[in-house]
Image: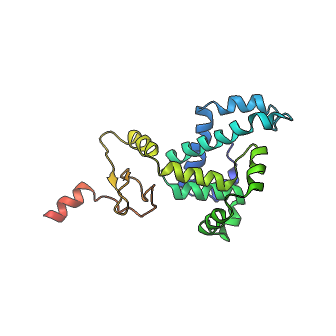
Amino acid sequence: MLHSGLLEYLTDDELLFIVGRELGHIKHGHTRWLSIIAPCGSAIPGLNLLYGHWQRKADYTADRAGLIACGSLDAAVRAILKLAAGPPAMRYASAEEFLKQAHEAEGSQLDRIREWFGTQPHVTSRIRELIQFAASDKYRRIVLAAGPEGERGRPCPRCGALTLNAFRYCVRCGAPLVPPEPEEGKAAAEA
């Protein structure tokens, strides 16, 4: 479900992440299983322990689908943070600072136990998993296969990762990518 209030706070790329994420849940059959596990919207007592791990993995899968849909790791992270903290809170928060603090807090045994008993992964875990996926060869193969026919992408000038021409930032290192010149612009410059 996408609430209309989100539309005023999300950029187009962030909205693409959210829609892609929800379509990922549908495509992978998560909605069917969730209707069995939680028929009234909340899990039947005890099923959290049995299916909590599956539900967390389903969220990771949906996040990956959202990243593929929007093509921007930066937008995906911002969308996750806006949904977690509330869009207005992001006016006063920094995604970079949040990630720095999350990295410092990583490894807490209490957080691991809390996550293990829950049905949703912590925001920090979702972002960490998404960053790892964005840097993977599997992600690049999926994105390049989904690109327009004949598009080979281009290497990042900083790290050499192959990215689609439509991407504005490298999915591996986050470096800004200069869009290629249109063919007619090249011809005019050469003349």
- Say which of 154 and 83 sits in front: 154
The residue lying at 55 percent from left, 44 percent from top is 64
- Say which of 137 and 146 sits in front: 137
Is residue 7 depicted above or below 34 in this figure?
Answer: below
The residue lying at 79 percent from left, 44 percent from top is 117
The residue lying at 22 percent from left, 56 percent from top is 184
Quadrant including the C terminus: bottom left
Instruction: Provide residue 157's location: percent of width, then percent of height.
Output: 34, 62
Picture quadrant where residue 124 is located? bottom right
Instruction: Provide residue 129's location: percent of width, then percent of height.
Output: 58, 50
Picture quadrant where residue 1 is located? top right
Q: Is residue 172 left or right of residue 87?
A: left
Disc tally is 0
For this orientation, the residue located farthest to the bottom is 92
Instruction: Provide residue 34's location: percent of width, then percent of height.
Output: 73, 33
Instruction: Provide residue 14's location: percent of width, then percent of height.
Output: 57, 54
The residue lying at 18 percent from left, 62 percent from top is 188
Colour mapping: rainbow
For this orientation, the residue located farthest to the right is 45
- Say which of 38 and 134 sits in front: 134
